[in-house]
C-alpha cells in the first residue's frame, strides 16, 4: 500500500509541470483568439485592464485560481518583457 501511494505521488509530481504548461498554452490561445498578444496570458491581460480601469474579469479568475493569480501573472509578464527588451538592446549594441 505504501509503494502505491509513493508511486502515485511520483506520477502527480511528474505530471503537474506538464499540466501547468498546458494551462498556460490554453490561456495564451484564449487571449490571442480574443485579440490579445499571443505571448500574454488571459489572466495577465485582464489584470492590465484592471490597472487601467477597463472592464475585466479579474474577480472571477482570482476566485477560480486563487487570490492574486492575475496580479502574479501580470508581474511575470512584465518581467518577461523587460528581460527580452534588455537582451535585444544588448544584441543591437553589438552589431
Image (tube, rainbow, N blue to C red):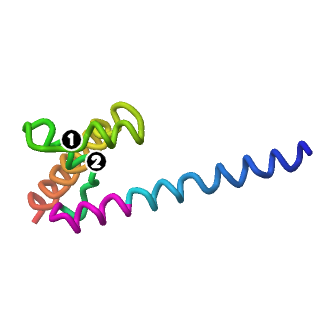
Mark 2 vs 1: CB contact within 8 A: yes
Q: Residue at x 18, y 61 (%)?
A: 37
**Residue for point 80% across, 51% down:** 7
Q: Is residue 2 above or below residue 15?
A: above
From the top left corner, tell me how far across and down residue 64 is, in percent: 41, 41
- Could you tell me which quadrant the C terminus lies in? bottom left
Choose top left, top right, bottom left or bottom right for residue 34.
bottom left
Disc on res. 47:
1
Residue at position x 45%, y 58% in the image: 21
Q: How many labels were placed on the picture?
A: 2
Look at the image and give the residue range highlighted in magenta: 25-36
State the image quarter where residue 76 is shown: top left
Mark 2: which secondary structure? helix
Marks 2/1: CA distance? Answer: 6 Å
Screen quadrant of the N terminus: top right
- Kindly state the secondary structure of the residue where label 1 is placed: helix
Taking 87 as reference, is 76 above or below it?
Answer: above
Q: Horizontal and vertical percent for residue 18?
A: 53, 59
In the image, residue 8 sits, relative to residue 72, either above or below, namely: below
Q: Residue at x 18, y 46 (%)?
A: 82
| Neighbourhood count class around disc 1 (C-alpha, 10 Å): few under 14, some 14–19, many 20 upward | many
Q: Residue beneath label 2, please?
A: 43
Which residue appears farthest toward the right when viewing the image?
Answer: 1
Magenta-colored stretch includes residue 32: yes
Q: Left or right: where does residue 18 sit relative to residue 86?
A: right
Amino acid at each position: 500500500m505504501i509503494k502505491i501511494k509513493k508511486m502515485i505521488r511520483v506520477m502527480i509530481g511528474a505530471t503537474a509541470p506538464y499540466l501547468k504548461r498546458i494551462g498556460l498554452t490554453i490561456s495564451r490561445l484564449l487571449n490571442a483568439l480574443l485579440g490579445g498578444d499571443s505571448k500574454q496570458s488571459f489572466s495577465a491581460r485582464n489584470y492590465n485592464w484592471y490597472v487601467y480601469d477597463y472592464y475585466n474579469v479579474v474577480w472571477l479568475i482570482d476566485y477560480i485560481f486563487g487570490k492574486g493569480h492575475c496580479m502574479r501573472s501580470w508581474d511575470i509578464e512584465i518581467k518577461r518583457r523587460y528581460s527580452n527588451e534588455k537582451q535585444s538592446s544588448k544584441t543591437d549594441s553589438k552589431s
